[in-house]
Image (cartoon, rainbow, N blue to C red):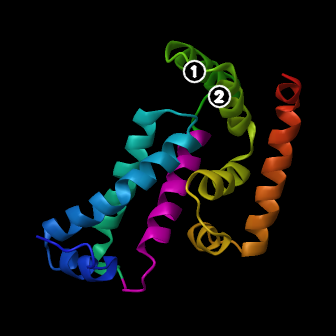
Amino acid sequence: MFDETENDDWLMDRAKAGDTAAFDRIVHRHQHRLQRFATRMLGGDQARGADIVVGAFLRLWESRAAYRPCGKLSAWLLRVANRLCLDSLAHTPTAEALALNLAVESHCLEESELALAVRLAVMELSEVHRSVLILSVYEEMSYDEIAEALEISPGTVASRKNHAIAALRRRLTAWETR
């Protein structure tokens, strides 16, 4: 049984030694955030998001022997998940097909029109802007945390977030008058 105060570095040291229960604890700690992030990056596709999460943890398990304690496992996992999302999006037929799938899924789930409009507007952002927006707004990460996870400067985080918000405002101006 593991204690909540045990940090990721200690658990990774245990996982290096073959302790699968320690690795399970890491998965338990980080899976929900990774799932939310990946699902949002992929336009609400939970199944593909789950595949991304499995891929990120698989990479962590495979590279556990090389892990060096640094207190930054969360950032590493988000960085891997982001790269896997970008790879997955590169293999998506077209943005229009994804938007159409989102519209159909959203209709089936009876989402409000505004929620659908916001989701589609977020999906229209470039991947680099979408990553920053999701981590900042939905995951409530600081600029420094996002910078670390995406390996960019905090200034670039701020610039990309501002660009994303401006693009969303332009896209959603029709909703201001409703």
The local secondary structure at tag 1 comes to loop
Seen at 42% across and 82% down, the residue is 71
Q: Is residue 96 visible?
A: yes
- Quadrant of the image occupied by residue 18: bottom left
Residue 125 image offset from top left, x and y in percent = 74, 42
Seen at 70% across and 54% down, the residue is 128
Seen at 20% across and 74% down, the residue is 3
In the rendered image, the residue lying farthest to the left is 1
In the rendered image, the residue lying farthest to the bottom is 69
Residue 69 on the magenta span: yes
Which residue, given by chain and number where applicable, does mark 1 sit on? Answer: 111
Looking at the picture, which amino acid does disc 1 mark? Glu
Q: Is residue 94 visible?
A: no
Which residue, given by chain and number where applicable, does mark 2 sit on? Answer: 115
Residue 90 image offset from top left, x and y in percent = 61, 41
> Label 2 near label 1: C-beta < 8 Å?
yes
Q: Quadrant of the N terminus?
A: bottom left
User: Which residue is at the front of the view, 50 or 107?
Assistant: 107
Q: Is residue 109 above or below residue 159?
A: above
Query: Neighbour class for label 2 at 10 Å: few (<14), some, many (≥20)?
Result: few
Q: Is residue 163 above or below residue 88?
A: below
- Quadrant of the image occupied by residue 43: top right
Left/right of residue 143 with respect to residue 77 in the rendered view? right
Seen at 29% across and 60% down, the residue is 27
Residue 147 image offset from top left, x and y in percent = 65, 71
Q: How many marks?
A: 2
Q: Quadrant of the C terminus?
A: top right
Residue 171 on the magenta span: no
Q: Which residues are magenta?
A: 68-90
